[in-house]
């Protein structure tokens, strides 16, 4: 029997915290190891418990979910902890900020319980999870803001990074941003999944990406994937 996925829940509303804990506790593969009522408490709990996944609300007192996510993602001691952002707000600005801060996934709170558990399992194994409807708006947001500061402030630096990628690395990055898994990429390029994983490790190093979700952001920001190409993560 495999080990349970250890989860910390962070939300400023007691009913939501208790509800998620009660629901998740009914799933045999999930172990809720902590509850936090704000971002600062979430960071402290993550440091103490080193959970596999933190379910993170965005709007919280003392420290919001974006800052808390960034703090967890930048802590080398928590490299095995993934943040799944749960929110009632499907606003592009929050999606962008959460993923840039290091979140591995973004899911709306009204998602089905089984869907939330599936999302936990997905980010726990190191994959990205972005709800398709949210990703669609996110991609359109990137396309429409191509001339704005969010995509142009570090254009020169980003272009240098893009230029540093080999042809194979660019090809794999585009396929990742298009929603393909390592196994699907391997099949598409006639290489082994292990080789794909090696390339991804190098790409993450070059792009300073925390995980696959940030690779997706990098690819869209730099025009490597167009709005017409659907990303079904």
Image: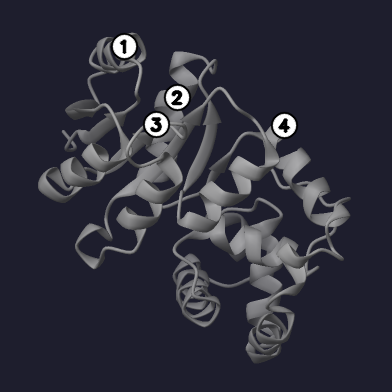
CA separation in Å, label 4 and label 3: 24 Å
Residue drawn at (61%, 43%), measured in percent from left and top?
A: 95
Image-based side of 200 in relation to 15, left or right:
right
In this figure, which residue is indicated by the disc labeled 3?
60
Kind of element beneath mark 1: helix
- Residue 66 x/y as whole percent: 45, 46
Circle 4 residue: 133
Identify residue for label 1.
23
Tell me which residue sits at (87%, 66%) in the image: 147
Residue 71, labelled with which disc?
Answer: none
Element type at marker 2? helix
Contact? badges 3 and 2 (CB < 8 Å): no
Residue 218 position, x and y percent, is 65, 66
Residue 128 visible here: yes
Badge 1 or badge 2: first in the primary sequence: 1
For the residues labelled 1 and 3, the Cα–Cα distance comes to: 22 Å
Give the Cα distance between marks 1 and 2.
Answer: 10 Å
Distance in Å between CA atoms under marks 4 and 1: 24 Å
Q: Nearer the viewer, mark 3 or mark 2?
A: 3
Q: Nearer the viewer, residue 186 or 106?
A: 106
Sequence-first tag of 2 and 4: 2
Mark 2 touches mark 4? (CB < 8 Å) = no
């Amino acid at each position: 029997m495999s080990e349970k996925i250890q989860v910390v829940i962070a939300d400023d509303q007691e009913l939501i915290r208790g509800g998620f804990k009660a629901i998740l506790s009914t799933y045999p593969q999930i172990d809720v190891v902590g509850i936090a009522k704000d971002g600062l408490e979430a960071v402290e709990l993550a440091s103490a418990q080193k959970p596999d996944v933190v379910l993170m609300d965005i709007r919280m007192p003392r420290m919001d979910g974006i800052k808390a996510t960034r703090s967890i993602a930048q802590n080398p001691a928590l490299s095995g902890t993934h943040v799944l952002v749960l929110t009632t707000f499907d606003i592009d600005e929050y999606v962008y900020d959460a993923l840039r801060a290091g979140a591995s996934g973004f899911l709306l709170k009204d998602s089905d319980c089984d869907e939330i558990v599936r999302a936990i399992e997905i980010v726990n194994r190191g994959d990205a999870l972005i709800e398709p409807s949210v990703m669609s708006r996110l991609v359109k947001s990137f396309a429409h803001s191509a001339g704005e500061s969010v995509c142009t402030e570090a254009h020169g630096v980003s272009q240098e990074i893009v230029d540093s990628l080999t042809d194979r690395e660019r090809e794999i990055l585009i396929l990742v941003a298009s929603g393909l898994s390592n196994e699907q990429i391997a099949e598409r390029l006639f290489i082994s999944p292990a080789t794909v994983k090696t390339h991804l490790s190098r790409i993450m190093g070059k792009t300073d990406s925390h995980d696959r979700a940030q690779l997706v952001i990098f690819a869209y920001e730099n025009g490597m994937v167009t709005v017409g190409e659907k990303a079904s993560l």
